[in-house]
Amino acid sequence: MALRLSRRLFFPVTVALLAGCSVSALDMEEPGIDPSVVTGSIAPAPETTPPAHLPVGTDAMLHAMVAEMGEMLDGAPPLSWADEENGVRGVISHIYDDGTCRRFVTTRESFDGISLYRGTACPSPEFGWQIQAFEAV
């Protein structure tokens, strides 16, 4: 009979002991516990200014323009570019030397139509050539 009683008490006593151990581990007042790791306490992301929205394909256009930049200034033939991955292509018809930057005129053809753009690309010590302005004409 004592054996039955010990079997019946074993499970409830074990659960009570384990529950006591787990509750004591969550004491937030105890030094060494980092309260920032509590679920739902993720700090909001700092507000940043969104980057200028550039249409898909401008990276491919910029790479083509930079590769041919020395030869294309002052009346060179138009330069075709394509972004096969996104299905975008175009033709850079003019590149103008603007001191350190280059102004350009290009078309952009995609599933939504053909558009004409004017833009400016400038060198950056950290990132190479970057598009500073890109607007539809």
Image (cartoon, rainbow, N blue to C red):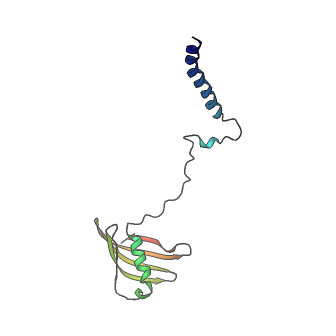
* Relative height, residue 26 to residue 14 (above, below): below
Specify whether 125 is left or right of 98: right
Specify whether 120 is left or right of 10: left
> 108 or 31, which lies in front?
31
Indicate the quadrant where residue 93 lies.
Answer: bottom left
Residue 65 position in % (x across, y down): 41, 79
Name the residue located 62 percent from the left edge and 30 percent from the top edge. Answer: 23
Name the residue located 41 percent from the left edge and 82 percent from the top edge. Answer: 95
Name the residue located 61 percent from the left edge and 43 percent from the top edge. Answer: 36
Residue 127 position in % (x across, y down): 52, 72
> 103 or 130, which lies in front?
130
Going by the picture, which residue comes out furthest to the top? Answer: 1
Residue 2 position in % (x across, y down): 59, 12
Residue 62 position in % (x across, y down): 42, 75
Name the residue located 63 percent from the left edge and 30 percent from the top edge. Answer: 21
* Relative height, residue 11 to residue 129 (above, below): above
> 70 or 9, which lies in front?
9
Pick the quarter of the image with the C terminus.
bottom left
